[in-house]
Image (cartoon, rainbow, N blue to C red):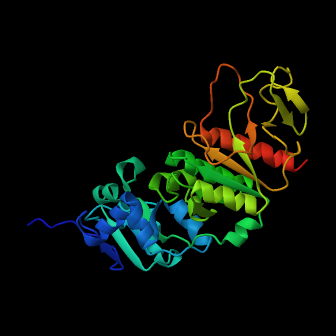
Amino acid sequence: MSTSPFQYHIPQLFRRLANQHNATAKHLIALREKKKYRLDNRSVLIQGVKTIKELRNKGFEFNSIAITAKNKPNVESDIKYPAIDIVKHPDSFPAKSYYVTDIDVTRRILGTSSRPSNHEVFAEVPIPAETDEVLLKEKDRLLVFDGISDPGNLGTLIRTASALGWESGLVASQSCDLYNDKTLRASRALSLSWKHKQLDMAEAIQFLKSNGFTPVVADMMPANSHAEIWSPELGTKTMMDKAVKPGTGVWFWNFGQQPIVLPKKLALILSSEHHGVNDLDDEIRVSIPMSSKVESLNVANAGSIIMNELNRYLAL
């Protein structure tokens, strides 16, 4: 008489989501797929134990944490890292609820582009309240996103901004949702803690001007070869000057009647390559000199370079 192999029992704390039609699974899927749903519920999905640990260490709470494991593990070793860490030490990952799913349900919840592992960990995290305007007014530099529709670019910019000390800013209308799953992955969930306020562009410009910020728009170098451009290190030049070349930092132009100096309070405005910036008429422009072999950089690359160069100039 044959006997069935011993079956390992996952602790009862972890409720099994057997299929995507389960009410909780549907809720988690909707958080990823539907912007209005996640904003109404004020929560998002976060993938990966490392990111979950980082959020835990920042004081974030978790509505739920889920692990991925096969339906009938025979022994404990069938559940591998990182899922087994949650199974053995749930107290280290405090949450209101705990779930376990198989890889097929995990793929449906997180989306196939997330490439979850067979032992994946993910969590539902509350979205923090919007940043108070008072905090933004006190900054000496802000980042403004205008019409950045690609979530990968937006997430990369937020991660870079956080690394370079650009801790806060404004998100103007027509920009991608900061809590889109691709934005969250690209930012390593930093878009949850990046301080910001959501406004349409006209409101954003009014906020900047009424609080003493000078708008500085990232743009291509001026097409006019005789146009005057300025560098805090190299002074005023024209586009014809041989000093204006790649590696000489970023250059400013379009000062109009404003003093040719670096503003004490500036707002760097980044827009998508094809979108351009609307609602402005007296802004300073900032550009990166590039090889003639390259037409342009995408906004994530350009924005990262400009933020770093502005940091350097502001420290002079």
Identify the residue at image location x=37%, y=60%: 34
Report the side of 255 relative to 57 (left or right). Answer: right
x, y percent for residue 277: 62, 44
Report the side of 269 relative to 72 (left or right). Answer: right
x, y percent for residue 124: 44, 69
- Can you say whether 118 is above or below 254 in the image? below
Report the side of 100 relative to 179 (left or right). Answer: left
Residue 106: quarter of image: bottom left
x, y percent for residue 228: 83, 29
**On-image quarter of the N terminus:** bottom left
Identify the residue at image location x=79%, y=42%: 309
x, y percent for residue 60: 56, 73
Q: Single out the residue that lies furthest toward the left.
A: 1
**Count of numbered circles on the image:** 0
Return the residue nearer the eye: 300 or 56. Answer: 300
Return the residue nearer the eye: 220 or 166. Answer: 220
Residue 99: quarter of image: bottom left
| Residue 181 seen in this snapshot | yes
Report the side of 212 relative to 45 (left or right). Answer: right
- Can you say whether 157 is above or below 98 in the image? above
| Residue 168 seen in this snapshot | no
Identify the residue at image location x=26%, y=71%: 23
